[in-house]
Image (cartoon, helix red, strand yellow):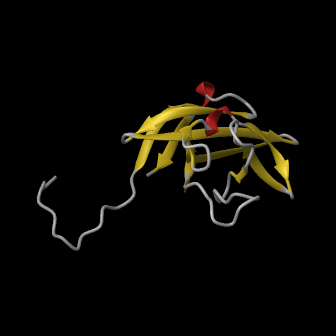
Amino acid sequence: MSTHMQAQAMPSAQWHDVCHIDDLVTNSGVCALVEGQQIAIFNIVQGGDKQYFAISNWDPVGHANVLYRGIVGTLQDKVVVASPLYKEHYELATGKCLEREDVSVQPFAVRIEQDRVLIEL
């Protein structure tokens, strides 16, 4: 891999092997450090269906890396996490804050391969 990049070249997203699916906690979050960034990863089970989500762990209102510790649930038919600090609800699929249009967190794509959790960053 060349260390020389042209100024107009943008780095492409890469998939990162983060953990085994057994490292996740059902209907809760865990935190992983990926490329120097804290990522909150959620394993949500509703009605027998498993869904995996990943968002930035940074709470933009509380100014702390705490979102993985939030309470997960549904609000307005959306799967959300409530910040443990000021209780804003962030939609896990999009990162949008339900209470404030001017606030959001970055969502990341998640895929499972051979029981490994991969995050696109």
Q: Is residue 34 above or below residue 21?
A: below
Q: Quadrant of residue 85?
A: top right
Residue 91, given in percent of the width and then of the height, sits at 71, 54
- Give the farthest residue toward the bottom: 8
Determine whether, in the image, residue 112 is placed left or right of residue 101: left
Q: In which quarter of the image is residue 43?
A: top right
Q: In this view, does 58 lie above or below 5?
A: above
Tally the marks: 0
- Give the farthest residue toward the top: 23
**Res 114 visible:** no
Residue 54, given in percent of the width and then of the height, sits at 59, 46
Q: Is residue 70 above or below residue 9?
A: above
In front of the other: 118 or 83: 83
**Res 15 visible:** yes
Q: Quadrant of residue 65?
A: top right
Residue 2, given in percent of the width and then of the height, sits at 13, 55
In front of the other: 8 or 57: 57
Residue visible at 60% across and 39% down in the picture: 41
Residue visible at 55% across and 55% down in the picture: 106
In front of the other: 96 or 8: 96
Determine whether, in the image, residue 78 is placed left or right of residue 40: right
Residue visible at 79% across and 39% down in the picture: 45
Residue 95, given in percent of the width and then of the height, sits at 63, 56
Determine whether, in the image, residue 98 is placed left or right of residue 66: right
